[in-house]
Structures are given as C-alpha cells and as structure tokens.
Image: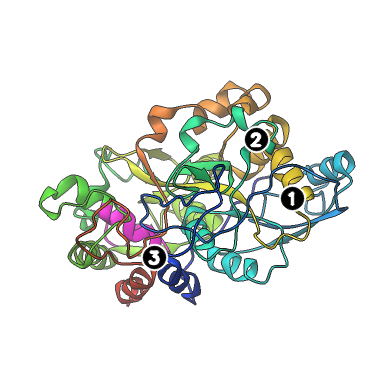
Amino acid sequence: MKIIRRKCTPFGALLGVAALALVAGCGTSAGSSGTATPGAQGFTPPDIPMQKSIGKMEGKVNILAWPGYAEDGSNYKDVNWVSPFEKQTGCQANVKYFATSDEAVTLMKTGDYDVVSASGDASLRLIAAGDVAPVNTSLIKDYSEIEPFLKNRAWNSVGGQMYGVPHGWGANLLMYRTDEVKPAPTSWGAVFTDASQYKGKVTAYDSPIYIADAALYLMKTQPGLKIDNPYALDQKQLDAAVTVLKEQRQNLSEYWSDYLKEAQAFETGDSVIGTTWKIIEQTAAAEKAPVKAILPSEGSTGWSDTWMISSQAAHPNCAYAWMSYITEPKPQSEVAQYFGEAPANGQACKITGAAFCKAYHVTDQAFSDKLWYWTTPISQCLDGRTNTTCTDYGDWTQAWTEIKG
C-alpha cells in the first residue's frame, strides 16, 4: 500500500508571499562564515544562527510532515520507521501531518514544530520569513551520500548555504492511454495546443504552480517570449501562460489533486491524457489500465522535498537527530517505496533494489537535469534579471482563479 501527498493545492492565504517581499534585501544569514549570503533569488535571508554541534537529546521532537513521510505503524502495522528512531535516540516523535504547503507555512509560524518536510513551493517562503534556520550539514550523518544534484539548489539554499536536507523527489510526467491516444505523444503540446483532439478527456494538476508547466512549454516553443525560467515570469510572460491554460481549460475533464481519483479516471477512460506522477501510472497499470507515462521532449517540472529546522525549535538536538536519521539509507528506502518517489540518498538503492531505482531515476542526474523543480515565484526574478519585476505567488494564485473560472 502506498499513499501520496496532496501538495500545492490552491492557496487560501498569501502571508508567506508577503513575507518574501518584506524581507527581501534585509538582514544577513549566519552561514558557515557568519557573513551575509545573498543568493541568486535576489534576497538576503534574516540573521538566523546556525547550530554548531549536537548536544544532549531533549527527549522529544515535534515533526510537521507530508502524509507518508513519518509513519509510526498507526496507519499500517508494518509501516513504521518512527519507532526505530525513537528507540535509537530517546526522542519521542510527535507527528502532525499537513495537507498543503500553505498549511505547513502557517503552522511553522507558530513555533510549535521543530522540523518540517517542505516542498519547493514553500521552502523559500520559510527561509525569507526567518521561520527556518540554516542547516549545518556536517551534523547530518549521511549527508555525503545525498545525490549531489539535489544540493545547493534554488529552493533549498541561499548564497551557498543549505537551509535543509534533501529528502525525496520526483517528476511531473505526461500520461496517456495507449488505446485512445495515437500516435504516442512526445510533447506537452498534446495537452496544450493540441488538447482539442481529446476534448473533455484531458486532465491537469490543480494548483497555481501548474502555471509553470505552461511556462515551460512556452519557453521551449515560443523563444520570442524570452522565458529562461518557468518560475520567473514578468507580467507579459505570465499573461501568455494564462492564455495557454485558459484555452486548455475548454478541453479538460477535470483538475486533479487526489492521486487515486486521477488513477481511477484513467482506468475508466474519463481521462485519456494529462499530467501525472510515476506512482499514479503504476497504480493505474496495476488495475490493468493501458497507460504509459513519459518525460516529454521539453522536459518537465518536478518536486524536491527538504527537511528544514525551525528557527524557534524547542528541541533542536532531537530535530537534527531526526534529519540525520530520516536521510539514512534504510528509512529512505522505506519512505520511497511506501510513498512512491525517488529517495535523495542513492545508497537506498541497495535496499530498494535496482528495478525500483531505475523506474524512479534515483541516481540519474541526466534525468534530473531535465526537470525544473517547484520553486516559489517571487518578485525578484529567479532568472537573474534585475531590470524588471517578476510576478510572485500572489499573482499566480489570482491568475489561477481566473483560469479556472
């Protein structure tokens, strides 16, 4: 049995986005050198100290996680990697699950949680608002085994300073029914410019972050728009992506956020083509649905989740113990197989087996390099432009409301 996150659902509040604007260009980041470390994102994080060493365990840790990331056997008896952690460290794990990145950001502001499994559409907001602290990776036991292509990226670091430990990742793929969609698609154009061929049977991910999928398609097919990063859109570029998505809307069967519902739609034939995850393809195929998922010629968007420590952590030593433990090969393999994603620690492949790692491209940097991982759009253009203002997640959320009607 596997479960999956329901991430990036439409945001009901824009507090985190406002925080980005407030802190941009303010404060310093206490990196390893203790000096300010502005990043390519265009802002300098607040001055949050980084832990230098591990002290005595506090006896508990409050974990905020996507469902499936911190299982203790209460859902399924044999699915339990929390209890071994507790026995090993003496830290009782109090786990709260969240359903959306917006919920996670809001809960982290309370100071009640020590660590959070943040997705790329939340991590920059947490960093910019000072809700998380820089992470001392030398205190993470197996950090050297984390795949290099997941480290020091725009969503988990600023100015060369890591603000978390990579956990798991995956691609947003194009899935189609092989008995209904012919010839086999090779481009995202199948669900954008050519979507009318499958009118009423196209499906798309239900989130403002899906705008990046349209932007990526335009980046590859309309060079005149000069899109260099699908998360860095000025108003003209955003308008172009919105136009594509409004046209797509006329051909959709539904927007999806529940992986089981999307799998069922492909099983029944209510949907025949659309964006998906590897676990959804496997779920539908297990029910004998004739489906196939591909990485289109333009590449794709994707996600990379990061364990981050609260700047207000009441139990920082147990928090570091958790981040270190959960990125070891054994728990990494357990989470990946239960959850349906690629583990960040490639050594987990020795446990999952070669077939799993091949299917999820665990150590495949060439595959990863074709992905544009979810990253929070902010007004400081993530593509390095300094002579213009980019649209932020607030603008994307408003646009998404217009797209859906």
Q: Earlier in the sequence, mark 1 or mark 2?
A: 2
Q: Given the image, on which type of amino acid does mark 2 rest?
A: Ser
How many callouts does the rendering have? 3
Residues marked 3 and 1 touching at CB (< 8 Å):
no
- Judge by depth and name the residue closer to the eye, 316 or 147: 316
Q: Which residue is mark 2?
A: 138
Label 3's element?
A: helix
Q: Which residue is mark 3?
A: 208
- Judge by depth and name the residue closer to the eye, 198 or 154: 154
How crowded pointer 3 is (Cα within 10 Å; few <14, some 14-19, many 20+) is rated as many
Labels 1, 2: front one: 2
Left or right, 194 with reference to 361:
left
Residue 88 highlighted magenta (yes or no): no
Q: Position of residue 175 (x, y in %)?
A: 39, 45
Q: Position of residue 123 (x, y in %)?
A: 51, 56
Picture residue at 53% right of the left edge, 68% below the top: 102
Q: Position of residue 142 (x, y in %)?
A: 67, 30
Q: Given the image, on which type of amino acid does mark 1 rest?
A: Ala
Q: Can I make out residue 191 in this image? A: no
Left or right, 395 with reference to 192:
right
Q: Can I make out residue 98 in this image? A: yes
Residues marked 2 and 3 touching at CB (< 8 Å):
no
Labels 3, 1: front one: 1
Q: Which residue is mark 1?
A: 319
Q: Earlier in the sequence, mark 2 or mark 3?
A: 2
Q: Given the image, on which type of amino acid does mark 3 rest?
A: Pro
Labels 2, 3: front one: 2
Residues in magenta, as a range: 198-215
How crowded pointer 2 is (Cα within 10 Å; few <14, some 14-19, many 20+) is rated as few
